[in-house]
Image (tube, helix red, strand yellow):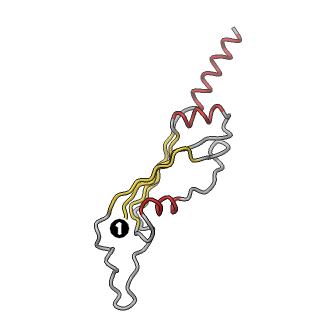
């Protein structure tokens, strides 16, 4: 009987620890200002351009100790690699989530290693 109760508890704890979560953060502010001409104060022409959408997804971003410790996520580098340098970026949203497989690995390693999936979306000119 004790063995069965221990097995039920182990399965219950494993299911609770492998739950998925999702975090969303968005900002409507521009990441990089458009350069103004020093001669006449006019825009360099990019301000009136039609914004284009971009999306960057990175799977298995490493986090440690139940997600409390991780290296800085190089959001600027990921965006620049996707759209190129010297672009005005607006309406940026960052989603961080743990998939079932991420949660399973988190459980197997007892919370020492808990990878996440990071998705960055926005517009640029």
* 112 left or right, relative to 84: right
> Toward the viewer: 4 or 118?
118
What residue is drawn where x is 68% and y is 17%? 6
* Mark 1 surroundings: few (<14), some (14-19) or many (≥20) residues within 10 A: some
* 48 left or right, relative to 83: left
Of all residues, the one furthest to the top in this rendering is: 1
What residue is drawn where x is 65% and y is 41%? 113
Where residue 55 sits in the image (x, y, percent)?
Answer: 41, 53
Quarter of the image that includes the N terminus: top right
Residue 38 falls in image quadrant:
bottom left
* 7 left or right, relative to 49: right
Where residue 48 sits in the image (x, y, percent)?
Answer: 28, 73
Q: Is residue 44 above or below residue 15?
A: below
Q: Is residue 70 above or below residue 102?
A: below
> Toward the viewer: 26 or 113?
113
- Looking at the rendered structure, the number of numbered marks drawn on it comes to 1
Provide the secondary structure element on which disc 1 rests: loop
> Would you name the residue on which mark 1 appears?
125
Q: Is residue 55 above or below residue 33?
A: above
What residue is drawn where x is 41% and y is 62%? 83
Of all residues, the one furthest to the bottom in this rendering is: 39
Where residue 10 sits in the image (x, y, percent)?
Answer: 65, 22
Residue 91 falls in image quadrant:
bottom left
Quarter of the image that includes the C terminus: bottom left
What residue is drawn where x is 60% and y is 57%? 72
Where residue 60 sits in the image (x, y, percent)?
Answer: 55, 44
């Amino acid at each position: 009987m004790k063995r069965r109760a221990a097995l039920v508890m182990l399965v219950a704890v494993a299911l609770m620890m492998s739950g998925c979560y999702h975090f969303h953060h968005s900002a409507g502010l521009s990441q990089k200002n458009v350069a103004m001409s020093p001669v006449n104060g006019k825009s360099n022409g990019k301000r009136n351009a039609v914004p284009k959408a971009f999306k960057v997804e990175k799977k298995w971003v490493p986090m440690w100790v139940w997600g409390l410790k991780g290296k800085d996520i190089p959001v600027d580098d990921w965006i620049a690699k996707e759209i190129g340098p010297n672009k005005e970026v607006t309406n940026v949203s960052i989603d961080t989530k743990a998939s079932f497989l991420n949660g399973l690995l988190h459980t197997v390693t007892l919370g020492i290693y808990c990878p996440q999936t990071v998705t960055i979306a926005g517009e640029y000119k």
